[in-house]
Amino acid sequence: METLAQILEHFPAWLKAALDARSLFMSDLVMLGEIPSPTYGEAPRIEFILNRFFEAGLDRCSTDTKGNGIGFLPGTHGRQTILVAAHADTLVTDCKDQSIEIRENRMIGPFVGDNCIALAALTHLPTLLQNLQVRLKSNVILLASTRALGRGNLEGIRHFLTHGNIRCDSGLCLESVQLGRMNYACMGMMRAEIHCQLPDPYNWAQFGATGTIIPVADVVMRISRIPLPKRPLTTIIMGRLNGGIAHNNIAREVTLGFEIRSESGDILRELKERIEDIAEETSAQSGTRITLDILSQRDPGGLDIGHPLVKKGRSVLSALGIPPLLYPTTSQLSALRDAGIPGLTIGITTGERRNDLDEIDESVAIEPMTTGLTQLVGILAAMDEGVTA
């Protein structure tokens, strides 16, 4: 049994091995990123991942009734099981060109940071462990989960944790960015849309008829005036506004997409009620139909910073010289929390959304991926020693 200190001593050799294998990792990354995988349409990407699991010699490679891709890596003892998960769906739904461009130390493409880098790390992990001659005592389940984003609301991983025939003792959720994130707690979240539609009897010829844009603008203004506390941390993100067809045509329908995040479940519920009231009142005043559609909702909670698993994760980051980013997340970690499984969310590389790129394009750094993969193996090895001591 190796101690955490002994595990950290392996890092120079592991960094070199990860660098040597980076071309294979990037090859998987590009192929994964170019396979369309919208929520509820992940099957082609899952098929590719399962083929990689088969090639790596994993046991019991399969899908379940929600389409999750599952691979099983048996441990030498098998007394405990670690889940390593990355979501397979993407925010890209109707992009005709999902090609990924490789530049000097950069990869650029549609949502390349969400989540094909993490999926490439998932498919590459068995080969990397073999090359490093790392034999874990624990069983490891590799899960490419479906239906995580939007209306999916983590349906894939929740189904696996509820209906899977193996109890997981701990979990590690992979996200592509940012390297250094060490999420051990979950932010409460409500993702919703406000739909504004004109009623059937509407006087289109009336001078000053405003359609649906003005009422939705009023909703946005009123929501922006809601006072938000700094503690507990709370924010409202206005992320999307769609509607209308031309400058000189009254918009018959407008959709506002937004997300509320808070460390407090009570504040989350209070804000939901206030926005429902705003929508109802604006609907009555404007003569339009305004409805609130909740896409997904999660409660806050998670581990404390002093939990042994968090301490081990922070030690790995420190040994690799990675500045830790400690903040609550809205990732798949909340599904682990709901299932009573201690877990972390980590990132594999650094990335950014830049003004010189198209709206859906992201830029991610290549060089930090080596450190990100070494971090993954290090945290996994530390979890192999148990997460309660």
Image (cartoon, helix red, strand yellow):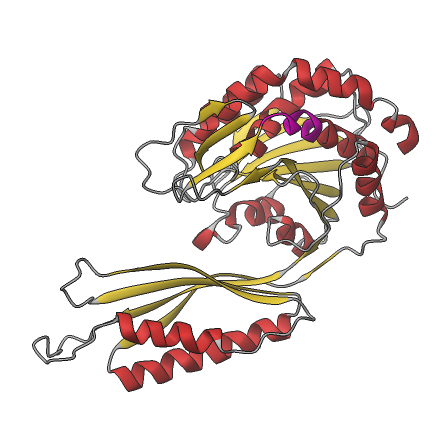
Q: Quadrant of the N terminus?
A: top right
Instruction: State the image quarter where residue 125 is shown.
Output: top right
Q: Which residues are magenta?
A: 366-373
How many marks overall? 0
The answer to whether residue 119 is magenta is no
Instruction: State the image quarter where residue 337 is shown.
Output: bottom right
Residue sticking out furthest to the left: 205
Q: Is residue 259 left or right of residue 293?
A: right
In this rendering, the answer to whether 364 lies above or below 187 is: above
Q: Position of residue 367 (x, y in %)?
A: 63, 25
Instruction: State the image quarter where residue 279 is shown.
Output: bottom left
In this rendering, the answer to whether 185 lies above or below 165 is: below
Camera sees residue 168 = no
Q: Is residue 388 left or right of residue 191?
A: right
Q: Quadrant of the C terminus?
A: top right
Q: Main secondary structure of the magenta part?
A: helix
Q: Position of residue 260 (x, y in %)?
A: 53, 65
Q: Position of residue 147 (x, y in %)?
A: 47, 46
In this rendering, the answer to whether 327 lies above or below 171 is: below
Q: Position of residue 95 (x, y in %)?
A: 33, 38
| Residue at left offset 29%, top offset 86% | 285
> Which residue is nearer to you in this view: 303 or 207?
207
Residue sticking out furthest to the front: 356
Camera sees residue 132 = yes
Q: Is residue 139 left or right of residue 10?
A: left
